[in-house]
Amino acid sequence: MIHTTVAAIVSVRRATLLLALIALTVGMAVRGHAQLGNQAGMLEANTATEAQLAALPHLNADLAKAVLAGRPFLRVVDLNALLSKSLKPEQLAELYAKIFVHINLNSASDAEMQLIPGMGARMVREFKEYRPYKTLDQFRKEMGKYVNATEVARLERYVFIPLNLNTAADADLNTIPGLGARMLKEFKEYRPYKTIEQFRKEMGKYVNAKEVARLERYITIN
């Protein structure tokens, strides 16, 4: 009886461990292909609601309305140009821990990267050292040479790698902030895309030019 009970417990533990390993493997696979890093509560400045904006540190009602009126921000430096008229650098750093405009890992300027809170010259250099990035797993691996896993996870909240518009899976496209089911359908409707101009023309049937430009940031034809 005791032997049977022990064997049962061992069997359950093995099954639990196996399930955990499977979940971890699946999670890593999803993350490896996801376009955005794990956001962990980070808001995107172009899609946050007025209520979300107003709840952020140092963003009063007037600043929240100014952000809404200024959207879309195609670069975080554009958002910063607006907010820096009213907020001090230390206030901006606190704010950018909670909201940001994602930067393209493969093309972001030094000025954009330096707006990530706590981003020093060394990490700017390391971000650029490993371009072009193909996956976020590559980013995690390379940055893990310089900072610990917690810091890598923090940094990945700020970045993205453009997705191939012709081959990206639905799950990957859905990581584009504010895409939605309708635009996901339209993205796929016109495949294969030959040029970025074709993308602009077709998506311009459904959203205005500013929104097309915002969505375009997250994709590539190549």
Image (cartoon, rainbow, N blue to C red):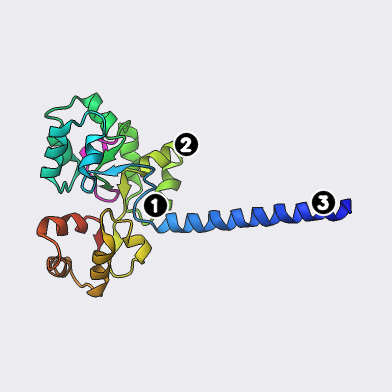
Residue 68, compared with residue 186, is above or below; it is above
Q: Is mark 3 on a helix, strand or loop?
A: helix
Of the numbered discs 1 and 3, the one sitting upstream in the chain is 3
Apparent side of residue 165 relative to residue 134 in the rendered image (left or right): left
Of the numbered discs 3 and 2, the one sitting upstream in the chain is 3
- Report which residue position mark 3 lands on: 6
Q: How many marks?
A: 3
Q: Nearer the viewer, residue 104 or 211?
A: 211
Kindly indicate whether the residue at mark 2 contacts the one at mark 3 (C-beta within 8 angstroms). Answer: no
Inspect this view and state whether residue 215 appears. yes
The segment highlighted magenta reads 104-116
**Residue located at (25% from left, 60% from top):** 219
Q: Nearer the viewer, mark 3 or mark 2?
A: 3
Kindly report the distance in space between the C-alpha atoms of the residues bearing marks 1 and 3.
43 Å
Kindly report the distance in space between the C-alpha atoms of the residues bearing marks 2 and 1.
16 Å
Q: Nearer the viewer, mark 1 or mark 3?
A: 3
Q: What residue type is labelled 3?
A: Val
**Residue located at (36% from left, 48% from top):** 130
